[in-house]
Image (cartoon, rainbow, N blue to C red):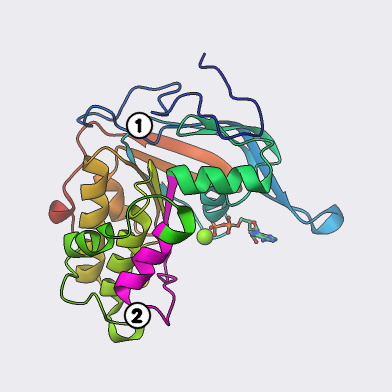
Amino acid sequence: MAPMSTTGGDAAVNPAGTAGEGSAPGAPPGARGGVRLRGVTKTYGDGEAAVRALDGVDLDVGPGELVVVLGPSGSGKTTLLNVLGGIEAPDGGSAEVAGVELAGRRPRGLAGFRREHIGFVFQFFNLVPTLTARENVEVMVELTGRGERREAVALLESVGLGERLDAFPAQLSGGQQQRVAIARALATDPDLLLADEPTGALDVATGKSVLRLLQRTNRQGRGVLMVTHNAAIARIAHRVVTMRDGRVESVTTCDAPADVAAVEW
Ligand SMILES: Nc1ncnc2c1ncn2[C@@H]1O[C@H](COP(=O)(O)OP(=O)(O)O)[C@@H](O)[C@H]1O
Ligand SMILES: [Mg+2]
């Protein structure tokens, strides 16, 4: 069994996050972003009003995997992402992400973990409306002290927005805004990219262009874990996790996930 880090501090036990599992099939050497959850619980509220959003979650994800999480509304998908991304600490159990044990970490330690290891992409983009595309990416570099400010332009070019660097979010389409959000999430070179219904607010063609970017970043050796309501997207995953009532209901693995271009919905 892999060693566990003690609580607090930022020391990574295992920078590649390889605990428990091998890398995704076809992942490049040095693939990152492995996950190992054991008995993870998270309860909101207390007494009569308590909701057990995660009720004993066990999950293994190898470095460099693309994971799709499915499940009905209220089944705990967003809570799972929040725990994996260090937005919230688990109440109980063990949660090792990219080689770092998160259980028992204080908010400061979680913030350090997030900065160093995690990128987030949200359904409604969450760009700062008063900043340009370029500034939305640069501000992430400034806030986290990770990555290089001058990389912002290259990142926006890589998501096809080299011509819209100085556009404000309101001047961009939904798909363009999501591509800015992906560039922003990649600015810190995260081990694991967490995406909560990243295509949920987009039409099919635009959603596909966003999924292509997520698949590309995964093939570069990063972990990608994405929540979706669209079961067709499961075909691009190395691992499909379904959740129900705060628990993992099933896990299916695939050695040869489909290209986004080959998936129809
Ligand atoms: N901040 C919160 N306060 C209270 N209850 C919450 C909070 N966040 C989520 N919940 C509850 O936890 C359960 C799981 O929610 P969530 O993880 O958002 O599910 P999903 O993303 O699958 O729709 C739901 O019953 C939800 O109402
Ligand atoms: Mg949700």
Task: Classify mark 2: helix, strand or loop.
Answer: helix
Q: Which numbered circle lies on residue 63?
A: 1
Give the residue type that dot 2 points to: Pro
Q: Which residue occupies the extreme left position in the image? A: 262
Closer to the camera, 1 or 49? 1
Confirm whether the magenta stretch covers residue 54: no
Residues in magenta?
118-141
Write the residue at 24% across / 59% down.
155
Give the Cα separation between the discs numbered 2 and 1.
33 Å
140 to the left or right of 4 = left
Q: Which numbered circle lies on residue 10?
A: none
| Residue 149 at x, y percent in the picture | 32, 59
| Residue 246 at x, y percent in the picture | 60, 46
Confirm whether the magenta stretch covers residue 123: yes
Of badges 2 and 1, the one in the foreground is: 2
Write the residue at 50% across / 57% down.
72
Can residue 114 be seen here? The reply is: yes
Write the residue at 38% across / 28% down.
16
Please determine whether, in this image, residue 238 is positioned above or below residue 227.
Answer: above
Please determine whether, in this image, residue 242 is positioned above or below residue 183.
Answer: above
3 to the left or right of 240 = right
For mark 2, what is the residue?
169
